[in-house]
Amino acid sequence: MKTIAVLPAGSVSDEAARHFFGGEEAIWKHHRLISDVFLSTVNGISDYSIIPIENTIEGSVSLHMDWLVHEVDIPIQAEWVYPSIQNLIGRLSEAAGENGEIDYSRITKVISHPVAIAQCLQFLRTHLPNAATEPVSSTAEGVRIVNNNPGAGWAAIGTKTAAANEGLDVIAGKITDHDNNYTRFLLVGAEPYTVRKSDKMKTSILITLPEDYPGALHQVLAAFAWRKINLSRIESRPTKKKLGNYYFFIDIDMALDTVLLPAALQEIEAIGCQVRVLGSYPSFSDFDRE
């Protein structure tokens, strides 16, 4: 039985993890901070960590990417996509007006993870333009804070699971700006994930360009292009060593053990680039267990 570190119960990460593992038996280790999720696996307390890395609306979760790059050295073993359905959560008794209908002016503060807040900006601007927003470490943490402060006029953005766990109401459901709001999750740990197979494999790499090689990025991309290797994502992140120096985080739609990809990486290293493989792993985009 595997031990899995994840953000608090009722968070989107927790829902996504349980959906991914389905009926597989597991021991869940819930942590308030993403740093503790990572360190749980680094320190051998858990076998895997669940990391939300990218969102349809907000793009990359920079803090989590930086942890993966700068703070830890544990490989990616799988990825999957899960719908992020956000709701406005609180107490209907506090949000209802004299006629019994929702009076959003009664809500003075909305608490949630900053990514979840950003996913719901249109709703907040329309219905809660005067409410303050307060970022916290997870959506589940925001719901817990609201539950612990009755009568304050506060609400949270989070999942229906978190609302049920804390005994709160869903004041407004599905408040994200777009219906196709999905989050990409990574399973990181030392042991390969082999329970289920996928027809799609991906490899994630980190490339550092040589400072004295003009056109190096063009050469990097050319090494993939002429081999017809598809890059599903390329993003720059600062090395944190010198202003203007960047890593390039690249996702490749191919397994590392193919013929073409190792040759491409060797060509890139030959021009003086540093290549770090973050993982080669199965990718799951549709795994409905219903």
Image: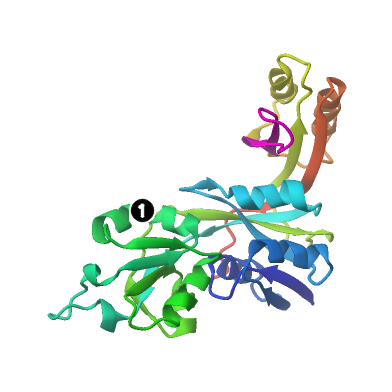
Between 55 and 129, the one lying in front of the other is 129
Query: Where's residue 29, x and y in %?
Result: 70, 75
* Kind of residue sitting beneath label 1: Leu
Residue 248 picture location, percent across and down: 69, 33
Asked if one can make out residue 112 in the rendered structure from this viewpoint, the answer is: yes
Left or right, 232 with reference to 3: left
Assess whether residue 239 is covered by the magenta stretch.
yes
Q: Quadrant of residue 221?
A: top right
In percent of width and height, residue 6 lies at 66, 68
Magenta residues, start to end: 233-251
Count up the numbered dots. 1
Q: Is residue 83 left or right of residue 221?
A: left
> Which of the pair 210/271 is nearer the observer?
210
Query: Does residue 199 show up?
Result: no
* Image vertical order of residue 109 relative to residue 77, above or below: below
Residue closest to the eye, 54 or 40: 40
Report the predominant secondary structure element of the magenta stretch: strand
Vertical comparison of 202 with 129: above or below = above
Quarter of the image where one finds residue 258:
top right
Vertically, is 239 above or below 37? above
Residue at (65% x, 62% y) in the render: 34
Q: Secondary structure at mark 1?
A: helix
Percent position of residue 253, x then y: 68, 39
Question: Is the residue marked by circle 1 packed among few (<14), some (14-19), or many (20+) residues within 10 Å?
Answer: some
* Residue of label 1: 121
Q: Please say whether residue 268 is one of the residues in the magenta stretch.
A: no
Q: Is residue 225 above or below residue 148?
A: above
- Name the outermost residue toward the left: 99
Determine the residue positioned at 39% across, 61% down. Answer: 133
